[in-house]
Image (cartoon, rainbow, N blue to C red):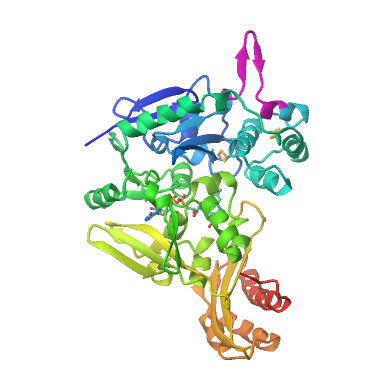
Amino acid sequence: MENNTLKFLLNDKQVEIDFLKTDYLPSTTVLNYLRSQSDLSGTKEGCAEGDCGACTVVLVELLDHQLIYKTIDSCLLFLASIHGKQLITVEYLSQKKGQDIVLHPVQQAMVNYHGSQCGFCTPGFVMSIFGMHKSETPVNDKSIIETLSGNLCRCTGYKPIADAVQHDCHLKFDDHISAKEGQVKNQLIGINHSIPSLKIHASEQIYLLPSTLEEAISLKKNYPESRIINGATDIAIRQNKTHEYLPCILDVSNIKCLKKIDEIDGFFLLGSGVTIEQFKIFSENYYKPFQKITDVFASLQIRNAATIGGNLSTASPIGDLIPLFYAVKAKLQITGSKGDRVVNIEDFITGYRKNCLQNDELLVSILLPFLEDDIFVFSEKVSTRRDLDIATVSLAARLKLSSGNRVDEIILAYGGMAETVKRAEKAENFLIGKLWSQDNIEAAMAFIEQDFTPLSDARSGKEYRSTVSKNLLLKLFLLKRSGIVNN
Ligand SMILES: Cc1cc2nc3c(=O)[nH]c(=O)nc-3n(C[C@H](O)[C@H](O)[C@H](O)COP(=O)(O)OP(=O)(O)OC[C@H]3O[C@@H](n4cnc5c(N)ncnc54)[C@H](O)[C@@H]3O)c2cc1C
Ligand code: FES
Ligand code: FES
């Protein structure tokens, strides 16, 4: 049954948008929607590609009877995807009391510590700090950097802003937003109960937002040309920057079972809709070797939206998770109208930005085997900038040594060296059975040159890529020797 009407809470007001009676497309970004409202111009557009954070809003979702607050870049958020959620903008933070405007404690902290000059970036910073406060993140140096790394400021420098968080935002305080949480919960339950799914047939775009996997499978069968999206961080950029037209979208971000992490028969089972932020926390607890990569994956705003399924499905040669999943021999569960199948990660990626999914299929989950004690996993990403940058070259490696210090098993999965993530097979074959020694590693480095013919592009030259790829192998050796690599 068609349902063309999107319902969500905009701050404390319920909004309904019937896409048959409006000029907005379901894939209009939330930023563009807000900018078209005369009283909501606090949210700014800086880059429209997820880099500057000027457009940061807080999205509130009801999960297991709890309100979950997430900071998100509204320039990459499709309007129809916020169905059944609360959207909090900077305008909602302060309160009018009589003739006065009382700033939210987070805003007052920015004033107290001189965290704003021209003010263009300030609403974005305020929303990031507000999100930190609402998600009850403990305030310390690391969490401040993580919270602010998705916001750019060209005037103030970051010290006064960090000071504002450090000194005035660490105390627990209730605000008028907390006071209304009970009411918000009831309103969101009401919307999600009455309209769990959307099936929008607007004149220029079909937007399908199922709430169950069964519904998604049936929709994919009936709309085989539909473009699946989850966090949309990859797809929205194309709409914003290259004006790619998306005639039919199947948005799977509202399917709760795809966001779960479980354990099953020696594997961790991660739903394809697990966000990169969820995956980062999972890695800190269960898969420590992945932390080096998850720590530098984009920004919190992007990690809160982007998913592991989206990252794998892009099949990008510089997708951060793909080499990691090669190294641990991940398996992927796929489902479609003809049934389910499981494929190895290496069979999933079939070419430059191509995967093995058929038109009626979608990626459901990822199986990561528990790491055995004698397996070492190494990961490293080399990029121009540490934070919020994609890889120039990356390596994820798996290593098993025999009791005689010989190489029993090795996987060297490189990103950024070929049109897909690719293993350095010649170097691997050379090392198998050999003594794990610096001489042999240096000899293997020569094979890496034979394994790859890297390209020069805007990101770097081929000579640089070639040198870095060899040095990453040496780094694996040196770290293993120093005992720093651990699981
Ligand atoms: C500012 C910025 C920084 C970034 N930094 C990084 C970074 O550091 N490292 C990195 O690797 N990437 C980075 N990215 C790229 C992107 O965020 C990631 O690839 C992300 O994981 C994509 O997930 P998504 O859910 O947003 O995908 P979407 O945009 O929703 O989808 C991406 C692709 O996957 C397909 N897809 C999604 N879900 C499924 C499914 N369940 N079944 C089948 N197909 C599916 C879609 O059809 C689409 O082709 C960055 C992007 C931005 C905008
Ligand atoms: S406008 Fe720059 S991140 Fe959205
Ligand atoms: S205060 Fe001007 S950009 Fe931050």
Res 20 → quadrant: top left
| Quadrant location of the N terminus in the rendered image | top left
Q: Quadrant of ligand 3?
A: top right
Q: Is residue 391 visible?
A: no
Q: Is residue 20 above or below residue 461?
A: above
State left or right for residue 105 relative to residue 346. Answer: right
The answer, for residue 341, to whether it is visible in the render is yes
Q: Residue at x 69, y 88 (%)?
A: 439
- Name the one closer to the observer, 150 or 51: 150
- Which region of the structure is painted magenta? 92-108
Q: Quadrant of the C terminus?
A: bottom right
Residue at 61%, 18% in the rendered image: 95
Q: x%, y% of residue 68?
A: 51, 39
Indicate whether 112 appears above or below 206. above
Residue at (56, 35) in percent of width and height: 55
Task: Tell me, yes or no, whether the highlighted magenta stretch contains residue 51.
Answer: no
* Image x and y of residue 177, in percent: 56, 26
Image coords of residue 123 (percent x, y): 62, 30
